[in-house]
Structures are given as structure tokens and as C-alpha cells.
Image (cartoon, rainbow, N blue to C red):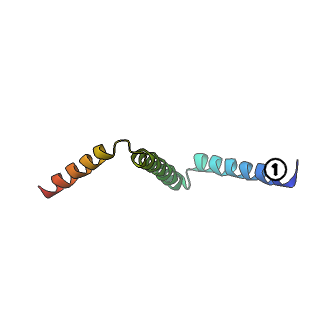
Amino acid sequence: MNKWMAKGFHAVEDVKEAFKKVLIDRKGGSTVEYVVVLAAAVALAGVLYNYVKNGGGQSLLQQKIQNVFNQIKS
């Protein structure tokens, strides 16, 4: 195993150990939950951006946003 593969292997092992500690001790658990939710939100934003960018649902999205603004006004 070359030195880069060894470093990568050790990094993966370190991450696994860190997750084990969080799951067992729950110390830092809220931070992990925050990171997971944030990652999911970024992934969803990316999917929506690509969907709108490619022309799919652009008028639907504009209509939904207009409905939100109309509800806020009234």
C-alpha cells in the first residue's frame, strides 16, 4: 500500500471512530444532526436549482412564489 492510500485508510478509520464516539456518548450529537440537515438542504437546493435552470417547472415555481407573496400581503 502506498503512502497516499495509507493516509486515506487512516483518515477513514479516524472518521469511523469519531462517529462511533458520537453515537455512543451523544457528545456532539446535535452538531452531527445539524450537519446532516444542512447537507440535505444543500442537496435539495441543488436539485431544485438544476430543475429550474433546465426550464422544468419555472412557471410553476414563479406561481408558487407569487402565491406566497399574495398571502403575505393579505
Q: Is residue 66 left or right of residue 74?
A: right
**10 and 48: which one is in front?**
48
The furthest residue to the front: 55
Residue drawn at the location 49% of the way across and 54% of the way down: 30
Task: Please say if 56 is above or below 69.
Answer: above
**45 and 33: which one is in front?**
45
The furthest residue to the left: 74
Q: Is residue 19 left or right of residue 45?
A: right
Residue drawn at the location 74% of the way across and 53% of the way down: 11
The image position of residue 58, as x and y in percent, is 33, 46
The image position of residue 18, as x and y in percent, is 65, 52
**Label 1's element?**
helix
Kind of residue sitting beneath label 1: Met
Image quadrant containing the C terminus: bottom left
Residue drawn at the location 81% of the way across and 50% of the way down: 5
The image position of residue 8, as x and y in percent, is 77, 51
Task: Identify the residue position indicated by label 1 in the image.
Answer: 5
